[in-house]
Amino acid sequence: MNRKPLLLIDVDGPLNPYAAKAQRRPEGYTTHRMRPTGWTGAESAKPLRVWLNPDHGAELLALAEAYELVWATTWKDEANDWIAPPLGLPRLPFIDWPQMHGRAPRGTFWKTQYVLEYAGGRPFAWIDDDITDLDREYVDQRHPARALLLRVDERIGLLRADFDALAAWAA
């Protein structure tokens, strides 16, 4: 039985600071053009611009000593095809959302209820750009184990302080 806590990883926001100024790629990031199946009009539209920082792959792999890494993204399994390779990550398990962008309990983010189902009572840390205080309250009231909900600014992405906080929480 795996006793490591889960590290639930969102892509857009934490790994891809999509809301950064379009004309200015964030320092340390490389530009990738992608056509995941969920990209609207993928046949005719320009490919999706995704900014990824290759250092984040090494940081996540270092955290894998203390965590079981899991994709918690609307990219679902496609994160393994499009996001993992440029970051040097292996294929990871993913949350297969029963419904995306649907209704959520008590004003929480739509992912929150499914994150709790996936965690199944295990400790977890979750990095996402849509986490609010309502989500933290919901998890505190309904999850029997420790949980860290780490909101990441979608204009900036993961920072050194975020990786340090994740490492400290797991310890």
Image: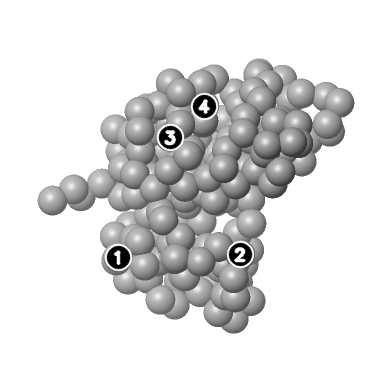
Nearest the viewer among 26 and 35 is: 35
Circle 1 residue: 120
Whichever of callouts 2 and 1 sits on the residue coming sooner in the sequence is 2
In the rendered structure, find residue 80 and report the number of the disc placed on it.
Answer: 3
Question: Which is nearer the eye, 155 or 95?
Answer: 95
User: Could you tell me which secondary element the residue under label 1 belongs to?
Assistant: loop
Residue visible at 74% across and 36% down in the picture? 44
The residue to which callout 4 is attached is 56
Q: Is 120 placed left or right of 157 in the picture?
A: left
Residue corresponding to mark 2: 101
Q: Amino acid at mark 4?
A: His
As helix, strand or loop, the secondary structure at mark 3 comes to helix
Instruction: Residue 22: give x, y in percent of width and height.
Output: 83, 31
Q: Position of residue 106 (x, y in %)?
A: 59, 81
Residue 139 showing in the rendered view: yes
Q: Name which residue lies at 47% across and 70% down.
A: 113
Q: Position of residue 6 (x, y in %)?
A: 34, 49
Dot 3 surroundings within 10 Å: few (below 14), some, or many (20 or more)?
A: some
Looking at the rendered structure, the kind of residue marked 3 is Asn
Which numbered disc, 4 or 3, marks the residue that appears first in the sequence? 4
- In the image, residue 25 sits, relative to residue 66, either above or below, namely above
In percent of width and height, residue 146 lies at: 36, 61
